[in-house]
Amino acid sequence: MKNWQKILLAVDGSPTSERAVRYVCNIAPLMREAEVCILNVYPEPPPDYYTQGGRLDNYKAMREARAKEMLDEAVTQLLAAGVPESRISRRVEMAEGRTISEVVLEARAEGDFGTVVAGKRGVSKAEEFLFGSISNALARHSKNFTSWIVG
């Protein structure tokens, strides 16, 4: 697999996501040509958000501000670990009618990432149905790429 050094790092701010960032910080500097794309995918607003007067542009601005903080922290850690800034990219996306897992897998395919790293999060059956379990989706769909699930 020629693209194994192209790493898609999915982050959500959870403790296991933070461990996944630290894991990549330990591994990526050992790879001569590692490229890391840090991805945050956030869900659509809950249905009652609009009935309470919420606006989509405000929701997106709030979620993207949170995502920027997460991504900035991950970039800071990667730089400190020795990953060149030119090999780090960022991406933030709302799920919009898809599960978070679907968006991660689509981003993986679009960017031709050979490695996907995510933290394992304990999710309820309801959360898995609504948002998808990223670790389960990666395990099921890992064809032509490697999944690193950090617990």
Image: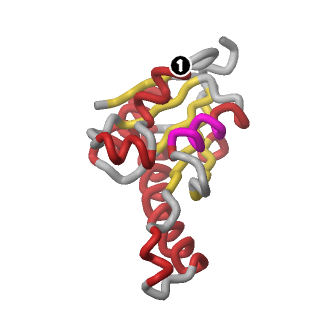
Residue range corresponding to the magenta coloring: 101-107
- Name the residue at 65% across, 38% down: 106
* Place of residue 78 in the rendered image (x, y in percent of width and height, measured from the top left): 47, 43
Q: Name the residue under label 1.
A: 146
Q: Is residue 84 visible?
A: no
Judging from the image, the colouring scheme is: secondary structure
Which of the 4 image quadrants contains residue 26? top left
* Place of residue 100 in the rendered image (x, y in percent of width and height, measured from the top left): 51, 46
- Name the residue at 42% across, 75% down: 48
Label 1 sits on a secondary structure element that is strand
* Place of residue 84 in the rendered image (x, y in percent of width and height, measured from the top left): 59, 41
Q: Is residue 129 visible?
A: yes
Most prominent secondary structure in the magenta stretch?
Answer: helix
- Residue 136 horizontal side relative to residue 31, left or right: left
- Residue 40 horizontal side relative to residue 110, left or right: left
* Place of residue 105 in the rendered image (x, y in percent of width and height, measured from the top left): 59, 34
